Structure formats: C-alpha cells, structure tokens
Amino acid sequence: MIKSMRALSLLTLLGLSGCSIMPQWMDARTWFADEEELKIQQLEPIQAEFSPQLAWEKEIGDGVGDHFSRLQPVLAYDKLFAASRHGEVKAFDPETGKVVWQQSFARFKDGGFFSGIARLWESGESARIGGGLTASYEKLYFGTENGEVYALDVNTGDTVWRVEVEGEVLAKPAVEAGMVVINTGSGLMLGLDAETGEEQWRYESDVPPLSLRGIATPTISSGGAMVGTASGKMAIVIMENGQVAWEQTIASPSGATELDRIVDIDVEPLVLGGVIYVVSFDGTLAALELRSGRVIWKREYRSYRRITLDGNNLFVVDANSVVYALDRRNGVELWSQNSLRSRVLTAAAPLSDYVVVGDKFGFLHWLNQSDGKIVARFAAGDDDTDEGVYVEPVVQGERLFAVTRDGQLKAIDTP
C-alpha cells in the first residue's frame, strides 16, 4: 500500500521521455475524483489571529497553466520581476503594482507583412520560460525549456544577450563573481560570463534512466558553485576554472524498480556558516561541511522543495506536504504540521514570526514559527487546481507576493 501511494504521488513529478518522465500537472479531480480527494480539499477550521490584506493584484499572461514550473518572481533594484511560461516578462513597482516595463518572448514565424499583422491577434509559439528569474549586475537572467538563456536590462527589459545551451533550463540561474551558473536537464552545469553569455566552463553529472522532472538550482558560495544531482550527489565546482572540488554521495539508489531507485537532489542547496543543508527525494536531509563535504548530521525526510531558514530553524516541506521545523545545528525536530497533508504545498517562506506556504487549491497559510500552529489563511486562488499557488511566495518586509497557475500575481500584507 505504501509503495502504491508513493507511485501515485510521483505521477505529478515524473515523466517518461528519455531520461525523465514528462510532468504535466494532473488534476486529481479528473483522474482520481473520490472521497479522499474531496476530503483533502476541505480545510480544517482555524482560529485566525489576523486577516491578511490584499494590497494589489496584476496578471502575468496565462501563467504556467498545467505545466511543471518553478517560475518564481524576484525582487531586486526596487522592482518585482515576474514572467509567464508563454513568454511575458514584466517589471512591477512592488508598492503599487504599476507596470514599469514589459516584454514578450513568444515566437512568431518570419512571414513579412502578414506575419506582423498576425501578431495583433495571435499569441505566437510559447517561449517555455521555466527556469525562474535571477537579478544581478543590472540584468535579469532566466532560462527556457527550449535550451535558451537570456539576460535583460533590468531598467528597460531590452535583451542584452541570448545564448543556447545543451538541455532544458528548469532551474533559475545562480549569479556571482561575474558569472552565471546554469544547470540543465541533461546533467550539464555551465558557467557563463555574466556580461556576454560566453561559456567559461562545464561540469557534467550522470542522469539515471528515471528521475524527477526538475533539477536543482545551483548555489554559489566561497568561490564554489554547488549543486545537487539526479544521482543523489552533492558537488562543488570551483568558479574560477570549473574543476570539481569535491563530490559527496547523499543518497544511494536501492530497490528493485527504477521508481524505487529515484534519489534526486532536486532542491537549491542552503549555505550558512560554512555548512551546506540539502535534502533528497529518497529521504535524506543532510548537513555537510562546505570545505570538505564531510557529513555533519543526517535525518530522514523526503522532499523536492527548497529548504528555508530563519535564525537557527530549518523549515522543510516533505513530499507529503507535512511542514517541519528543525534545529539547524543538530537536525533535531522542533515541531511538525500535518493538517495540510497532500495539498501539494510550496516551500515555506519565512515572514516575521511566521512561515507561509501556498497550496494547489489556491490558499496561503501562515504558520507560527514557534509551534507550527496555523494562525491565518488567505484565498489567493479560487479553490481550484488551475488557480493554485505552485511556487514559494516572495517576501519583502511584511508583504508577500504570490503567483497562481493562471498568472494572477498578488501582493498581500500581514497586519
């Protein structure tokens, strides 16, 4: 029974196309519309301690639809940048929601005059933006499933450079030390010059026959680019020359089937005080020494969501949407919140004394950092998987920015 439940949960994450299963958002009401699904959709009542307030809302095209995506907005340079999968990229004033600039990267066939007329009523071919956004060096960087990487001017949205890479870009770029680090679905991580896009080095990891749809976002720290791989390893590559500093196995494949043997590290490594925190899908949360890769401690948690941190507390949302708080120093569990189980939660975003998670039915939930109690709730969508919150909210002070699958971007204040 446990294996069958695990297989069902994996259907939203996996696909069978060469080395990975093509993930499409599966509406459980269509495929598995039963009493259990209806029970999950019904939220338990809470004693709300405050009422989050909507400050403004805008549209970002059609959002990401039913596709796998980690297309999270980003705050930088006094702007909020957001994008849709189809190709709309917009910069907003985070205080008012006013659009500062907007660009479209949808593709149109070059057919002369009549092609130009067609643009007036056709949306064009999707740019398939899926790699998330990163802002640095006065530029906005992102990648696409078509294997393209773009750098835009943050003030105008004009394209500074565009390069093609080998493999889908499903994770946001990491940018530091004059370099843009891109991780691709083909197991290739590239270091590109931040000003020109020219390739400086490459690191290649093994991709097993079956793996999660999605790849780990790299993290840059102390002169190294660190990344988790589909084979369950953590690796650090020296930024200056692309040489491997060390590789450490976090999770080893086991089991009789390829499904049982999935060990992807599909999250962005978290680095603090010379320690790397990372979690794998097979059930290993680990703290590693940054310099050597030595394992400091390990715990059993399965996740494909980013680990977040506030003070000494690590926040982990596991594969079943149970939220945990752990002491980062020793991995001791402080509390767990399981009343949102199976709601496909986002990672937990720390905000003041709370952490905020979104779910596939369009709700945001505020959990008290001290004990995990749910203290507030906000309907960002319309109790519908098509309008669900699919990616971790972005926080600025007491305000958070949440985006739904249908492209609704909302600024919400915590009183």
Image (tube, rainbow, N blue to C red):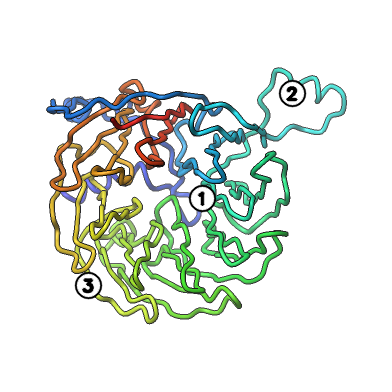
Residue at 12% in and 27% down: 47
Q: Nearer the viewer, mark 3 or mark 2?
A: 3
| Whether label 1 touches label 2, CB < 8 Å | no
| Whether label 1 touches label 3, CB < 8 Å | no
Looking at the rendered structure, the secondary structure element under dot 3 is strand
Residue named by callout 2 = 119
- Name the residue type under label 1: Leu
Quadrant of the rendered image containing residue 396 = top left
Q: Is residue 10 left or right of residue 93?
A: left
Task: Name the disc covering residue 170, or none.
Answer: 1
Looking at the rendered structure, the secondary structure element under dot 2 is loop
Q: How many marks?
A: 3
Task: Name the disc covering residue 302, or none.
Answer: none
Q: Is residue 196 above or below residue 355?
A: below
Q: Is residue 359 above or below residue 150?
A: above
Q: Is residue 203 left or right of residue 355?
A: right
- Name the residue type under label 3: Trp
- Residue furthest to the right: 113
Q: Nearer the viewer, residue 46 or 201?
A: 46
- Name the residue type under label 2: Arg
**Distance between the Cα atoms at labels 1 and 3?**
29 Å
Q: Nearer the viewer, mark 1 or mark 3?
A: 3
**Between discs 1 and 2, the one toward the N terminus:** 2
Q: Is residue 52 left or right of residue 228?
A: left
